[in-house]
Image (cartoon, rainbow, N blue to C red):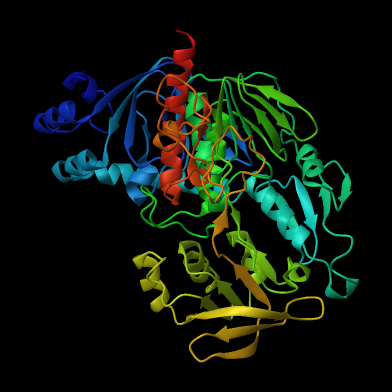
Amino acid sequence: MITLEELRGVPLLAELSEPTLTYLVGAVEDIRLVPGEYFAREGDERSLFVVMDGHVEITKVVNGDERVIGERTHGMLFGEVPMTLSTKFPASGRATLPARVLRLGVTEYHSLAAMAPTVSASVAEVARGYLSDLQTWASVQPEAEARLIGPRVNADVRELATFLTRNQVAFDRVTPDEDEGDTREGYPVLELRDGARLVTPSMREVAAAVGLDVMPSAAEYDVVILGAGPAGLTAAVNGAAEGLRTVVVESLAPGGQAGTSSRIENYTGFPYGVTGEDLASRALQQARRLGAEIVVTRSVTGIEPGGHRITLDGGDTLHSPAVVIATGVEWRSLSVPGVESYLGHGVYYGAARSDAALAKGQDICIIGAGNSAGQAAIFFSRHARSVTMLVRGESLEASMSRYLIEQIAANDSIRFETRSQVVGLHGETDLAEVDVHDATTGRTARRPATVLFVLIGANAVTGWLPPSIARDEHGFVMTGSDVAGAEQWTSDRLPFALETSVPGIFAVGDVRSGSVKRVAASVGEGGVGIAYVHQYLALQQV
């Protein structure tokens, strides 16, 4: 426990009265650190730290690398900038030697400032001294790993841009002149820093070229997680953190369907919302830091229960006593004649922040009435000339959260039409017009529309699973009590809540029958799924 004498040895506190120092003795958190241990991380909520003993360094992630940008020794502060500006930590702090730091939380700091106004003035003065350094670091642009060359409207270019973004690969985007010919041919082109040039590459070629893992490093793991959406990434974070040899196999890129959400406003802990891309990016970084292996551009072609042999496309196999199925769902296709010819040329499934360039200055339509459609409408209204939501049902209330409905109603750039659906698409090469049928009037009208985002729900793609894994009539994987009486379940014990009809194989997130189709629910199931994996592995050792 800190003493009055030790506090008097800190320049900031040396002149404080004894009652004030007595308050601090009971208010501060006394933290002892081993070398390499962090006491604050970039992005954490604000606090004020005072170094009492040892040596700590201040680090910041720049261009994907953690750089040392400062140091602190006895009596020095850390956290003065976020405490003064009411922001999160712009950098991290860690011990380089055995160290001791004091932590003062926001409430305690403001109580101290009320008792001794000179403290907040001194902290603000120190903060001003560091602000210029922070501005310099903030101005450092990410060093691009590659240049992506391709027209604004091109399906393959869009897919590659999304792939690079979700895998946290920094790249520059270059749009060729419009008069360079047919935008469907010869793109995308990816130029790498070493001078290599890839023309219309496959995603696996791109992944290998930019240093992503496309091959598992081993043949055996404690747990194999199929899918890197919110549920899969959370399972990876928990599995790796708890010492399990963990690998995630993802067919394209991390993020899942949630990765296309332009803003999630009902996720706990983010009072002003968080984008799907940002949430997935944070989870991916966390999983990798904790030791989970993330393998991308690989799909699973089969699972053989009983020891669990997982076969990947190309014939590679993995073995694991526990498997977590977190493959999520895929967007439903739009049932309109000729829609395939406009995919990537005006018609897009899902809608991410990286699609802002597609909507800029355009008249866009969004098909759908769920939260994803509402989030997309609000986001694109900042970029498009107009946004029209086409809703087949009677209203938005049946499928959209109230907070989104209120935001849409207050946005003059968004209009929505109920009992309406697209029945025709027109344009020589790119989408130019759509036919919209109004079920109320019975009329069909043609209107200009160069961009159409389709968000009409999703289906489980589980046909590749063996018959021994029970699914419901819609293809979603059954778990827990739903499989306890199924003919596929042959074990003497009852299945765990998230366990499928095959012991040791679990299903979490949107792919699971009866799941709540919300990001927070998927994240929760990912963590709980690993808890059941531990219980299952413990049974195998008995």
Q: Quadrant of the N terminus?
A: top left
Q: Please, is residue 305 above or below residue 377 in the view?
A: above
Q: Which residue is at 27% across, 46% downward? A: 121
Farthest residue toward the front?
487
- The answer to which quarter of the image holds residue 352 is bottom right
**Residue 343 x/y as whole percent:** 73, 66
| Left or right: residue 329 compared with residue 176 | left
Q: Please, is residue 103 above or below residue 100 in the view?
A: below
Q: Which residue is at 73% across, 77% downward? A: 431
**Residue 413 x/y as whole percent:** 49, 80
| Left or right: residue 273 compared with residue 430 | left
Q: Which residue is at 47% across, 29% downward? A: 238
On the question of residue 101 being in view, the answer is yes
Q: Please, is residue 487 above or below residue 112 in the view?
A: above
Nearest to the observer: residue 9 or residue 466: 466
Q: Which residue is at 52% across, 34% downward? A: 286
